[in-house]
Amino acid sequence: MALGNSRTGKQVSKVATVPKVSGPLSDAKIMALRPATSGQIEYRDSMVPGLRVRVGTTGIKTFVLRKRIAGKNRNLTLGRFGERLTIAEARKKARQILSDVELKADPAAAVPKPQRRVVHAHTLNAMWPDYRQAKAHLRTVGEVERIFKQHILPEFGDRAADGITRSEITRFIDRIAKRTPVMARNVLSQFSAFYSWAMPRLDRLPGNPCRDAGRPPKPKARERVLTDAEIGALWHVLDGEGHPFGPAIKLLLLTGQRRNEVFEAERSEFDLEKRLWTIPAARAKNGVAHFVPLSNPAFALVKGLLEHDRGDKLIPARGNWEAGPSGFSKAMTRLRAGLEERVGEPVPHWTLHDLRRTMATGLQRLGVRLEVTEAALNHLSGARSGIVGVYQRHNYFDEKGAALKLWAAEVARLARAAKAKSKRPR
């Protein structure tokens, strides 16, 4: 805690005290407080006299206790609001200080002296570069880095790794799970992997705190498959979407490949003379290089996308030719609304990954053998996994080409049917 004095006019002008929020302060109410537009704003607590929450322009919320000591107004900084200092803990700390001030002969002695912050050599921030280097050989190192920088380091970066508890991790994961259960499981898995690496390097760490932390339940497997009417209507909606999402999602629908494999594709992966798309092992989810024969419609889309001559990406972001596009959420909102308008009725929620499942289901309906369907999807399960996968080395290249050609013809048929239906009087 830090001792401050807010009697000067300069300080007072920067801190504005507003009326109490309705009812006592709570953690939920504090979390909902918006950043100050300028300076700082203090919100008073109705349960402990002098206790306030100070909010700055960055949105950081700090508990302060204002008390008159030895004839002078003092601001006592209790600490930053968060998991380690909730409103309940702040009230407890404030009441103790108020009690000490009343009892001590020297009131100023009741105020704890500010302590120098000790930078722990084993904070997550300090250990992260070595851990990142240890994982540099992994194909998924980009995902490891993304999860650490977006989730783990902002929450625990300045904490000693051997001081983070199982309950703290559980609460952290629970908060993420309220928004995205799948991401919560991924974050916990990456955090646990870090501790497996860190344990031999931390003498005081008794065990992996992630091991017994609460884990969100595995989400139910999705079963969404677009109907024939939805497939045909979606094709026309994509006609109106334009670059980059229109042609890119058409390519995704025609080939059944994963979203990142399409949107992060490099120009060098395509051989127009052979009408072949080669997804390298480094980019394939299962680490196996994948050869995708291009049907006529897919070939036409790729040829059109390759007309630009800037950067290495097949589908570059606007204004950044070396990166893939962003703005997926807004694009999907437009496409879902457009599909409902085109179909003329509510459409169940669907995602880009559902298009991959839709193609797989469509190939089965068209009589394509399961092992060929799995080969087309580069999916190592079922017929291509286990001992069978070890000895069965046939890559089904010709069969994949025939299957994708058949599926492209089916999508074209459904698009024609949707167009004809839209012309009929209602």
Image (spheres, rainbow, N blue to C red):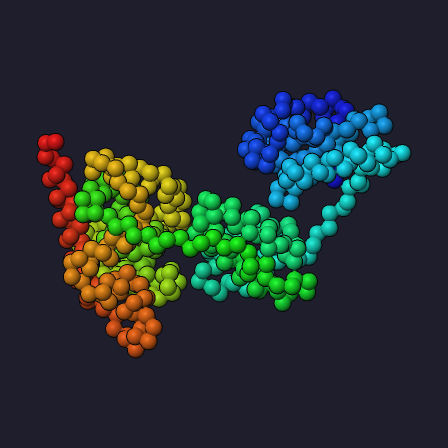
- Quarter occupied by the C terminus: top left
In terms of image quadrants, where is residue 46? top right
Residue 332 is left or right of residue 360, and the answer is right
Quadrant the N terminus occupies: top right
Instruction: Please name the residue shown 59% across and 36% down the image.
Output: 27
Q: Position of residue 173 (x, y in %)?
A: 52, 50
Left or right: residue 296 compared with residue 219: left
Residue 179 vs residue 249, the one in the foreground: 179
Is 27 situated above or below 254?
above
Image spot of residue 274 (x, y percent): 22, 62
Tell me, yes or no, if residue 135 can be seen here.
yes
Name the outermost residue toward the bottom: 391
Counting from the top left corner in percent of width and height, residue 210 is at 56, 58
Q: Image quadrant of residue 113?
A: top right
Q: Quadrant of residue 379?
A: bottom left
Q: Quick check: 214 above or below 39?
A: below
**Front residue of this view, candidates 223 and 307:** 223
In the depicted structure, whether residue 6 falls above or below residue 372: above
Residue depicted at 77% across the width and 28% down the height: 67
In front here: 245 or 272? 245
Viewer-side residue, 137 vs 221: 221
Looking at the picture, does residue 204 appear above or below residue 182? below
Identify the residue at horizontal 26%, vertical 40% (top origin): 347
Q: Could one spot residue 126 in this view of the protein? A: no
